[in-house]
Amino acid sequence: MLGPYKLRAATTRRIFASALALVGAAGPRYLFCQKSAMAASSQEAVQPSKRIRLTDEPCIVAMQRMLRGKEGIMSLAQGIVHWAPPVAASEAAAKAAGEPDTNSYCADDGLPVLREALKEKLRQENGLDGVEVMVTAGANQAYTNLVCTLLDSQDAAVLFSPFYFNHRMALQMTGGHASVVLAPSTQDYLPDVDWLERRLAEPPVGERIRMVTVVNPGNPTGMILPKAMLDRLSALCKKHGAWLVMDNTYEHFTYEEDGHPSHSCVSGDHVVNVFSFSKAFGMMGWRVGYLAFPPSLLPELMKVQDTIAICPTVVSQKVALAALGAGRAWVKEHVRGLKENKRLVIQALTETLGPGSVAGGSGAIYLMAKLPKGFENDTRVVEWLSEKHRVCAIPGSACGAPGEIRVCYANLAPEKCAEAARRLKAGLSELRENGPTIFQ
């Protein structure tokens, strides 16, 4: 007599054999299709994490989708520069392609020769000594490494509005919306340090601020933070046990000859500085950034680096090393060439939107412009500008500034930027003259 287990097994075999006989030669294929259908059905019920579903959509991805298939649109949107890397960098890329070590992993924190060159640059140009360096796949990966390293899931991090959208996304996808504390800025788009001091001293029940981020010069604001303000931010963070993260991606994009202040860094055992090769050296596609941080953080950062990237791309690091050799003078020469672009775009904006409507211009490559009253839906404005006037910008709502647009003036060479500014002026003039009914 068969036991219960053997009886069930025998019954299962008979049912399976009957099913095969019923469907004939198509049986296995039929059963596979049924299995796939059931799997697909069950997969539809499985959702991604709530954190990632609530994370903002990347505005650059949305912009690229909106522009896909459209010809002749001039972009003042994504933050890029119009120049190529130094000649030595391109030559290094060609040489690296034939070197065997290019095809292998390197040290997780980057090529030793590049790290040493960066430490020397940090000492000479930024006044940062005694720091460790980690090379990353751009400044965005550097910042994400920091979020994973410095924050627990219930910790809060401060961003000053208007903020850099990818910073908020990094915080959202790792800790959720509750982890982001949006701080106000002053009327001239500088961090409201008085507000931060009050918030750190008397936080709401359950809030624990562990990180404060500033971008200097600002993205999206185009403003340079004075050294005294940076020192005060650093002192407040140290007093209240918070990390100060400084994003210095646009360190070279300053206009001292026009009377604006220069870029400054601060250091300390609670300070981490983020840097990038992308904009200064025209290396957006090579994806090279780096962190300067207290040596005690190295073992913890290495855990994140080894998990996310293992190591930066070797060929990109060799290109970065060659670019670094071109020096600060090479970068500043190209940055000076942006002055005419900046003048053209500021003129186009102020002549149509009026005095006081445009912020920025002391640093970085961005301007923030307030749209006419009634155009709070800045995303619709951006769509309309691209469709009707063949020019695009970034909606301010992506940066926490609804009713504004972010305009980048480094994307195009001067002659093309002049045409883009003309289109922008024509579009904004039409908006101002017709009002919100223009969308009806």
Image (spheres, grey):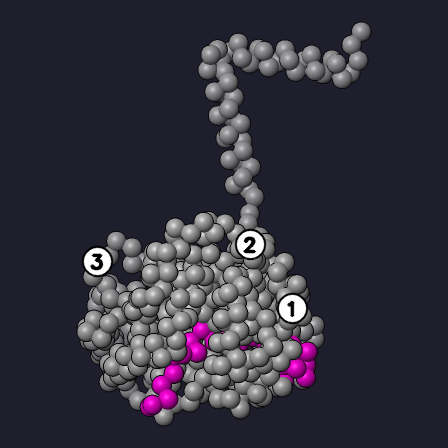
x and y percent of residue 195 in the render?
Answer: 57, 85
In front: label 1 or label 3:
1
Q: Residues within 10 Å of mark 3 (few under 14, many from 20)?
A: few
- Quadrant of image for the C terminus: bottom left
Q: Which residue is mark 3?
A: 71
- Choose the circle earlier in sequence order: 2 or 3: 3
Dot 1 falls on a residue whose secondary structure is: helix
> Which amino acid, by three-letter code, is at mark 1?
Leu
Q: Give the residue at x 51% y 61%.
A: 111
Q: Are marks 2 and 3 in contact (CB under 8 Å)?
A: no
Q: Residues within 10 Å of mark 2 (few under 14, many from 20)?
A: some
x and y percent of residue 4 in the render?
Answer: 78, 16
- Residue 38 in view of the camera: yes
> Which amino acid, by three-letter code, is at mark 3?
Glu
Q: Give the residue at x 48% y 11%.
A: 24
Q: Give the residue at x 40% y 55%.
A: 96
Dot 3 falls on a residue whose secondary structure is: loop
Q: Which residue is mark 2?
A: 310
Rendered image: mark on residue 390 = none
Q: Which residue is mark 1?
A: 297
